Structures are given as structure tokens and as C-alpha cells.
Amino acid sequence: MFAAIQAVVALRKLRFDLFARRFETWDATNDAIEALRDVCRKLRIGTPEDSDGGEARRQFIRLRRQLRLLFPPEVDACCERIQLAFQEYATLGMMMERPAAPSDQTAKVYIAQFGEYTQALDKTYRLQTELLILATPYMKQYGWLEIYGTPFARGVDGYVRAFIDKKFLPLRHRQPPEQP
């Protein structure tokens, strides 16, 4: 009996460790995506990629490796799409240049480029939401039974204790008949 209880405790501990690791990795990946988005906003024509941009990209790639180990392949495929969307977003941001002398034709071109740029930005947000939707079931894998089951178990435990106290406690406290 003791070994079975120890096995259950060890299993719960492993499940909690996996949950904590998955959540930390996903949270760091989400922060890396925000850092990439910030870097892409700052890129313009003629500016070399700063060290922050390269560091944000390397951090995202490192976290993708961890995601491959902790999550199913669909999450990694979503990360691949996110990486491609950021490349598109950065490229469009660098190609877009405000016209020095505005004319009708240059304004139309700029508006079209800006439309593509905002669509690429929206795509990064949509893919980030898709990543959240794909990863959530695996982050919630631990805890639902404990979260929802604990009040029930406490209620049952209280009921059982009350039943035992009511039915069996009087039997324990009954004094043996006195001997004359």
C-alpha cells in the first residue's frame, strides 16, 4: 500500500514538473515573439540588423528547440510559420519607405505597401494566438483533477469523518459495564 501511494506521489510530482517546464518554455517563447515583433518594428531601410535583433532571433530558435521536446509536432510547425511570418514582416518593413516628394502615384504605392505591412503584422498576431491554442491543452494537462477534485475530496472526507464520528465514536467511548 505504501509503495502504491509513493508511486502516485511520484507520478503527480513528475506531471507537475512537466507542466511547470512546459509553461515556462511557452511563456519565454511568447516573450521572444514579442521581442521579435519589437525588433521588426524598428527596422528600416539602410539600417543594419542590430545586435538586439539577432539576439531575439537566436532566443526564439533556442526556445523552439525546447518546444520540440515538450510539445507535439503541431506546435513546432506553428513556430515555423511564425518565423516565416516575422521574416515577411521584417522584409516588408524594410522595403517600405516614405516618399520624399509625395505624388499621387507614390502615395498609392506607399498605401499599398503599408497595407501589406499591416497584414503581415496581423498574421504574426494570429499565429501567436494559434500557438497559444495549440499549446494550452498540454499546459492544462496537469492540475484539472487536483483543482476540481480537491474541494470534492475534502467534502467527501468531511462527510466520511462526520459519519464515522456519529456512528462509531459513541461505540468507542462507551464504557464497559462496571463490575460489582
Image: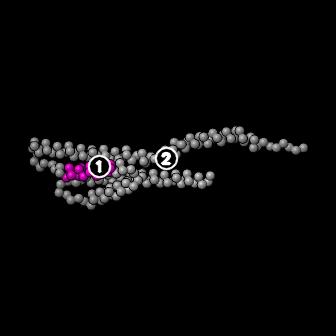
In what element is the residue under mark 2? loop
Q: Nearer the viewer, residue 103 or 158?
A: 158
Q: Residue at x 74, y 40 (%)?
A: 170
Looking at the image, how many numbered discs can be counted on the residues? Answer: 2
Dot 1: element: helix
Mark 2 Cα-neighbour bin, 10 Å: few <14, some 14–19, many ≥20:
some
Q: Residue at x 45, y 51 (%)?
A: 19
Mark 1: give few (<14), some (14-19) or many (20+) Cα within 10 Å: some
Residue 79 is situated, as x and y percent measured from the top left of the image, at: 32, 51
Q: Is residue 169 magenta?
A: no
What predominant SS class does the magenta segment belong to? helix
Q: Amino acid at mark 1?
A: Arg
Q: Which residue is mark 1?
A: 81
Residue furthest right as drawn: 180
Residue 121 in the image, given as x and y percentages of width and height:
26, 46
The residue segment tinted magenta is: 77-94
Name the residue at 61% across, 54% down: 2
**Residue 31 % position (x, y):** 35, 52
Instruction: Tell me: 139 left or right of 94.
Output: right
CA gap, disc 1 and disc 2: 30 Å
Viewer-side label of 1, 2: 1
Could you tell me residue 50's position as x and y percent?
25, 59
Q: Mark 2 or mark 1, which is nearer the start of the sequence?
A: 1
Nearer to the camera, 12 or 7:
7
Q: What amino acid type should be assigned to the residue bearing mark 2?
A: Gly
Which residue is labeled 2 in the image?
143
Q: Which residue is at a point 56% across and 53% down the rendered structure image? A: 7
